[in-house]
Image (cartoon, rainbow, N blue to C red):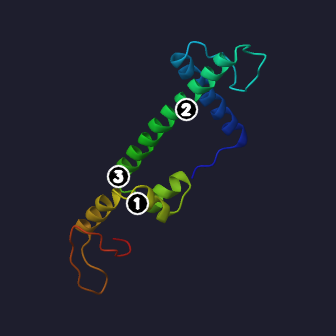
Amino acid sequence: MHTMSPARQDQMRAELNQLVQRWARQLDEATPDDDGQADASATPDPAARRRSQLARMTAGEHMRELLAGLIAKSAADATLYGAGYPELGEAVGISRQAARKRWPHLAAALGGRRARSWKQPPGGVGWATDSSLGYPGG
């Protein structure tokens, strides 16, 4: 996984927070321009503050769904260009086994493609089917 410096992580967190704020304002015009911290003095009306925080939650959940879809599509596309479970896992900081659990639907695509391109193991006789052969390097 590509590691980021703490400063870059803070910058990305701030940018994401700004985006959440913008989405929340679109969902609820009463959402204040703040950093999301609960401050009773910023909005005297508790109902408005509650709506504001609920709008932030809604915006955050929409983002999570969109990002999950983007990651899944990127994983599927990466397999088209030869990436396997080890590379997919490394990209998001998980093991190969965890990547296989996270994207089980890619197993057929990975196994099928590799099986069709597999010829013969060194010093042996082999054949290819649409299933994963489990041959190292195949």
Residue ID at (52%, 57%): 90
Q: Earlier in the sequence, mark 2 or mark 3?
A: 2
Q: Does residue 129 appear left or right of residue 48 in this picture?
A: left
Residue ID at (56%, 12%): 29
Residue type at mark 3: give it: Tyr
Q: Farthest residue toward the right?
A: 41
Q: Earlier in the sequence, mark 2 or mark 1?
A: 2
Q: Does residue 28 appear left or right of residue 8 in this picture?
A: left
Q: Position of residue 28 (x, y in %)?
A: 55, 16
Q: Is residue 27 above or below residue 71?
A: above
**Residue at the spot of label 3:** 81
**Residue at the spot of label 2:** 60
SS state under label 1? loop
SS state under label 3? loop
**Residue at the spot of label 1:** 84
SS state under label 2? helix
Q: Closer to the observer: label 2 or label 3?
A: 2
